[in-house]
Image (cartoon, coloured by chain):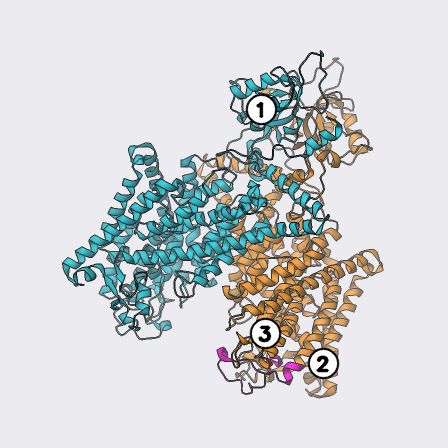
Chain colours: A orange, B cyan
Amino acid sequence: HDMNGNLMDFLDEPFPDVSTYEDFHTIDWLREKSRDTDRHRKITTKSKESYWELIKSLLDAWSGWVVMLLIGMLTGTLAGVIDLAVDWMTDLKEGVCLSAFYYSHEQCCWTSNETTFDDRDKCPQWQKWAELMTGHSEGAGAYVLNYFLYVLWALLFSFLAVSLVRVFAPYACGSGIPEIKTILSGFIIRGYLGKWTLLIKTVTLVLAVSSGLSLGKEGPLVHVACCCGNLFCSLFSKYSKNEGKRREVLSAAAAAGVSVAFGAPIGGVLFSLEEVSYYFPLKTLWRSFFAALVAAFTLRAINPFGNSRLVLFYVEYHTPWYMAELVPFILLGVFGGLWGTLFIRGNIAWCRRRKTTLLGKYPVLEVIVITGITAVLAFPNPYTRRSTSELISELFNDCGALESSQLCDYVNNPNMSRPVDDIPDRPAGPGVYSALWQLALALIFKIVITIFTFGMKIPSGLFIPSMAVGAIAGRIVGIAVEQMAYHHHDWIIFKNWCRPGADCVTPGLYAMVGAAACLGGVTRMTVSLVVIMFELTGGLEYIVPLMAAAVTSKWVADAFGKEGIYESHIQLNGYPYLDVRDEFTHRTLATDVMRPRRSEPPLAVLTQDSTTVEDVETLIKDTDYNGFPVVVSRESERLIGFVQRRELTVAIKTARQKQDGVVSSSVVYFTEDNPQVAEACDPQPLKLRRILNLSPFTVTDHTPMETVVDIFRKLGLRQCLVTRSG
Amino acid sequence: HDMNGNLMDFLDEPFPDVSTYEDFHTIDWLREKSRDTDRHRKITTKSKESYWELIKSLLDAWSGWVVMLLIGMLTGTLAGVIDLAVDWMTDLKEGVCLSAFYYSHEQCCWTSNETTFDDRDKCPQWQKWAELMTGHSEGAGAYVLNYFLYVLWALLFSFLAVSLVRVFAPYACGSGIPEIKTILSGFIIRGYLGKWTLLIKTVTLVLAVSSGLSLGKEGPLVHVACCCGNLFCSLFSKYSKNEGKRREVLSAAAAAGVSVAFGAPIGGVLFSLEEVSYYFPLKTLWRSFFAALVAAFTLRAINPFGNSRLVLFYVEYHTPWYMAELVPFILLGVFGGLWGTLFIRGNIAWCRRRKTTLLGKYPVLEVIVITGITAVLAFPNPYTRRSTSELISELFNDCGALESSQLCDYVNNPNMSRPVDDIPDRPAGPGVYSALWQLALALIFKIVITIFTFGMKIPSGLFIPSMAVGAIAGRIVGIAVEQMAYHHHDWIIFKNWCRPGADCVTPGLYAMVGAAACLGGVTRMTVSLVVIMFELTGGLEYIVPLMAAAVTSKWVADAFGKEGIYESHIQLNGYPYLDVRDEFTHRTLATDVMRPRRSEPPLAVLTQDSTTVEDVETLIKDTDYNGFPVVVSRESERLIGFVQRRELTVAIKTARQKQDGVVSSSVVYFTEDNPQVAEACDPQPLKLRRILNLSPFTVTDHTPMETVVDIFRKLGLRQCLVTRSG
């Protein structure tokens, strides 16, 4: 080995053909970054050589944008397809369209000739099952038959969903956000974002949502988007071969997922930044924004809701809010915080029980039973029978002139023909009172069933159920305040802002505030939550109520426990996740925390030029550390570098096969020069400098642990060596 | 010193009464963070002792929110006051209101009896100077008199502005954003954010903008907001005593500044995140959002524009855009990129000339001359005579029914009485053609004068002039496309989307896209730019044109040079700023970069127990390093810790004064135990372990420089020691 050869050894990448990280291991961000810089440097140097290389380098520079475009388009398309399929299958539980079986209720009635709005529900093309099978649409018999078929369809859908997940892609269950957070923080879970997971998750998500279970599609859509991201990463070696760069793409994909889930591109980017991502450079911010926009516009082009809106919950309110209303808004915030705490504690307790008892052995049975209970209890109540997102949409809506909902059955408003903007407060009719009872029952039902549903072995998000709980509670509070203001507008608190006949309380706004509070209580989102809600309403007007509720909810929930539902699930599943928000309260030094502890055997080290191959092999066999420090000698344990267990194993195996003269008694050396060979008959030494990491990360034994944790978080280290006087 | 004493020494903070950093020095983020953790820990421990301490700890936890509230309120108020004052003083150059001299033109005519819109410009209460002084409102004499007084007022305003800055607060000049970026990255510039700067900057900003110079108030508003932030920091020891925490507040204040400058709270937060801030934890994101909202709502409560809008440029367009229009939008992007390059190069060259030649010696004269030239050239052209923000507002606006602007002088539209939504494309009248010429002249004038204006010794922002350049160019392109579509709607490109009589081109949208492109070219903002523009229009509809223009502009400008105007000014002024976006292209190792280099004298070190006080004093005198590594001994230079020059000086000085027996030949020791004193007559040794940093940051000599730079950026280090084998 001449000097030049040494240099080459050092510059070359060690074993480029070996997959770098094992499954369920953590990546080394610093190393990934420096590998990418090397790659980039190589391409820049080459690009000056020929036009072909220049074009290749340009393509490489553009590949990031291409990936974002593809992710946005596929995510938007999948979201549109899921929306359409869910619509159709949810309606299939009730009946079928005679003109074309693949039409949902709404599409069916659009195409029918009855174009006036009032007749919409009576369009003849749409037939409920009982009507189709027996010819009778009324009566107890028809009701029972419809009930029976509703439950049957629900059971069929959920059975299909859980079976598909069990058989084809076990990773497709759950919301996926805890795992994605872990993966983005630098953990490897092979197959979690694979093609197979993508396909099965998309299909089973449709089935699970259609089955009427208390779950949403928003969380799983983030998972689906990340699967798309991973899929397109494999097209470009820049991303497929670098785990760090791959995670940048995944962060952007998560933004695209939320963007299509809520129709809120800016909210999606902030969600990815605030909630999901770990390492988020500015470049990623810009690209995430691009991906989120492409996804949103693709979804809009598909137009699944038929209203050329991006969002299902699009609302427009026409009355301002008043200062005094902050009191009920803050109360809703408290409710949201309490719901968050109750849900997290209950759900975690149930999931722990599932892990430890027999329950976990029968996931299919569990899903079937929960679906059965849900369907049986949901059918009689009109507010739980329909899909949850329709329910939320109705609760958010202000009672306009065209509303035929029970919730808008106000006494003074029989003909419903006044312009939308000018509906004053009015006494509630019997419809509103019966709706209130049904909503209260629906609230209790949703609260209980959601705790048991989230975490089952099917795709399940909790955004929509949480929002539903909040929206129901908010609407109830809103109607209560409205009626109080109507009947007691001489009270001092109403006097100033609520003149008789004026339109001063919007129950729909209360529903929205409640939904934000409950979602905030469960997930502890703040900025992204408010921005998502802002994008739904599209006006700065209502940001203050939303903020007040979100902040209160977060504070109340934080008082009972710092962790959101995702962090709790990460902990429950034992993923290695270093939360950015955790604060260190104890004063410890690196020396108190480092391994080996005082009672343990001394540190397993290699020396730079006196260990034999056999020693190394014994060390590898006896210990399970991921790597070993290399020191000057046993006597003077000064640190030279760090060598990975994996690379050491491969290097020795390769050397034993290919390099002559390497036997068990060969000396392994990490220095640049050959060690002095004592006798001529000694076996050929083995040089391993190329696998030695010459710049391992070190801290002194007196470094406070909060600094060490900070370094780990910010630099994404895999390990850190503790030294004293070198 | 017993063992306990040693422990106390170690735990106590060294010299809490000494101000920690000198002026024009860099802070140590890691140390600030660990100091804050200590403080927090102390308060948490104490809070369990008594109710009073508990209340104090709660107050401490809340102080962050209180600071944000105060910043938001003061920033919003100042922005409102500045807007009102600028309005009044800009109009003062033309005339005065007879009913009350402190009314601006618009306010004056509101209060007058002529309430119809057409008569607005003729309201009798408002009198131009010539009319007031001579009684004649028409004729060459009156024109010349108005012209003369316009120039005179402009000169007066700018003279006052530059004199105030010169005499009272030299830091009040410029936009302040480059310096704020530097400060936020961890640099100390005392007085830059002081009370005096705040006061003078606010006053002179009004004068400078009113003088009609080609500058805006947006950048300086960020500086003003940061001054507010600094002001309120001093109320709470949590922020005033910790430079790291202070910078969190300043980041949020910057967000509030942009929020009031554009009426875009979310855009403000993203601006702070993307453009200004260096260290931006999630907590800051949430608080920035709060501060930005409070500021926006305070401004709205003041309602300076009299339209209960947050923004001056509020626009609503009624026609969608078409795919083919992307071509002119992208061309505008190219123009924006070229303008950015031209502006940055020209402005930097001029500023460098100012620094190196005699020009810099006469800042007052320079301002007077530029103001004179601006005023003389601006008055004859109606598009440059009015304030730049009014110009932008007019250019953005779609021609509605109520527009009396020359730009809306279309032939088929003589009575101007059709509903706003339904104005088809139409041939341009003579007014539009003459407006085009005037706009073209205004464009050239603005381009040239802005290059010379930015960087003078008065408060000057470049957002507004940049946007004006873009808006003029965009409007010209928009009118051209519109007329082409009208006259040639049988052309293949127009055929598909532009039927005759339909409303297919919105010149106002082109102006907006052009403004975004030019602003993007100069500042290289991306996400925040698009979000700010999105908040101006309030619809996702136009985000694609804006993004297309912003991306094109950034790419074109980046092709000519990576740096935006702020980075260029940072470099010009030689501030120590480590750009997050810079990429390392050379392959160097820490050993190649570290000091001392091979040719220099060896490293100045202290030994742990063999240096005398005299040696230390000589070392301090002979070198100007900020600190010295402490090693085991001269023979075995293994690193023990690091000691700051400043603390060493103070410690020795204190010891010499207060501690008996410390003389020049006393041994300084950093170990825990006394060194063995050879003879009894030796002088008392001096223990300095408490000022020794036992956890200095080290890297090995083989660490690649890109890793080192990454560590410096992410951890905010002040120094880093390079070791080999310890």
Q: Is residue A460 visible?
A: no
Left or right: B451 as drawn, with respect to B199: left
Distance from disc 3 to disc 1, alpha carbons, whole Å, reads 71 Å
Task: Give me the residue at 52% from left, 21% from top.
Answer: B623
Type of the residue with mark 3:
Pro
How far across and how far down the image is residue A139, in percent?
72, 88
Give A357 or A189, whichever is nearer the viewer.
Answer: A357
Q: Residue under label 3, please give it.
A: A507
- Where is the C terminus of chain B found, in terms of image quarters? top right
Distance from disc 1 to disc 2, alpha carbons, whole Å, reads 92 Å
Give the label, 1 or 2, closer to the camera: 1
Tell me the SS state at disc 3.
Answer: helix
User: Dot 1, crowdedness within 10 Å: few (<14), some or many (≥20)?
Assistant: few
Q: Which mark is residue A146?
A: 2
Task: Give me the residue at 62% from left, 39% from top.
Answer: B35
Q: Is residue B195 visible?
A: yes
Which residues make up the magenta segment?
Answer: A404-433
Whether residues under marks 1 and 2 lie with C-beta atoms below 8 angstroms apart, the answer is no
Residue that extends furthest to the left in the rendered view of this protein? B140
Q: Which mark is residue A357?
A: none
Give A557 or B721, whichever is nearer the viewer.
Answer: A557
The earlier-in-sequence mark between 3 and 2 is: 2
Type of the residue with mark 1:
Lys
Type of the residue with mark 2:
Asn
The chain carrying label 1 is: B
The chain carrying label 3 is: A
User: Dot 3, crowdedness within 10 Å: few (<14), some or many (≥20)?
Assistant: many
